[in-house]
Image (tube, rainbow, N blue to C red):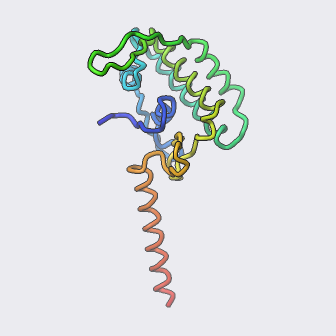
Amino acid sequence: MTEFRTGYGTAWLDLLASLTGRYLETTRELLPDPEAARRWLAEHDLEPVAPVTEADLEALRALREAVHRTAAATVRGDRPTDSDLATIDRALADDRPGRLAGSAADTGRLVVSRPRTAAEAAGRLARHAVDDMSGPRRELLRFCGDSDCAGIFLDHTGRRRWCADERCGVRARVRAHRARREGQRHQERGR
């Protein structure tokens, strides 16, 4: 089981979920230190060759927040802020295309070279985010249907309502059930 939230459709959307409770009073940072950031990057095949530093962590978090606000604006059809676009542009400056590094012996699948630095890994994430927000996949971006969740995901089916059915979907259904029961109680008291 992963320590990070995944399943949003692509790594850059999974990065947005590394800060939970975004719309609630209390947030939870899933990237509290450089080691957690390294593990997150490794889980998404972006572990850099160089160690992840505190400065790398701060830059990754700043990119995450700029991309979250820009993705939310994209879904709403609003214009992103110039400062968020500038933050994403700075990350893009470090983007270096991955090179094929052969294939994994056990799977036979092609392997892309590891980024040299965390900044290069962030640049790859920024490139994918920009491609998705500006290309044909932008029409697939959706907000999670749970009002307490700040998740944004790719909906390839056109029917998906939640970023994670087992978390947000269950929570939303439980709240709806409780609201129906409470409504029934009020109706019975009024008789």
> Looking at the figure, which quarter contains the N terminus?
top left
Position of residue 90 in the picture relative to residue 117 (left or right): right
Position of residue 108 in the picture relative to residue 57 (left or right): left
Residue at 62% in and 36% down:
138
Residue at 41% in and 22% down:
41
Position of residue 173 in the picture relative to residue 132 (left or right): left
Q: Position of residue 124 (x, y in %)?
A: 52, 19
Q: Position of residue 170 (x, y in %)?
A: 40, 56
Q: Is residue 111 above or below residue 156?
A: above
Q: Position of residue 55 (x, y in %)?
A: 49, 15
Name the one closer to the observer, 188 or 102. 102
Residue 89: quarter of image? top right
Residue at 30% in and 22% down:
107
Name the one closer to the observer, 120 or 137. 137
Name the one closer to the observer, 56 or 14. 14
Instruction: Identify the residue at the far front of this view.
Output: 108
Residue 33: quarter of image? top left
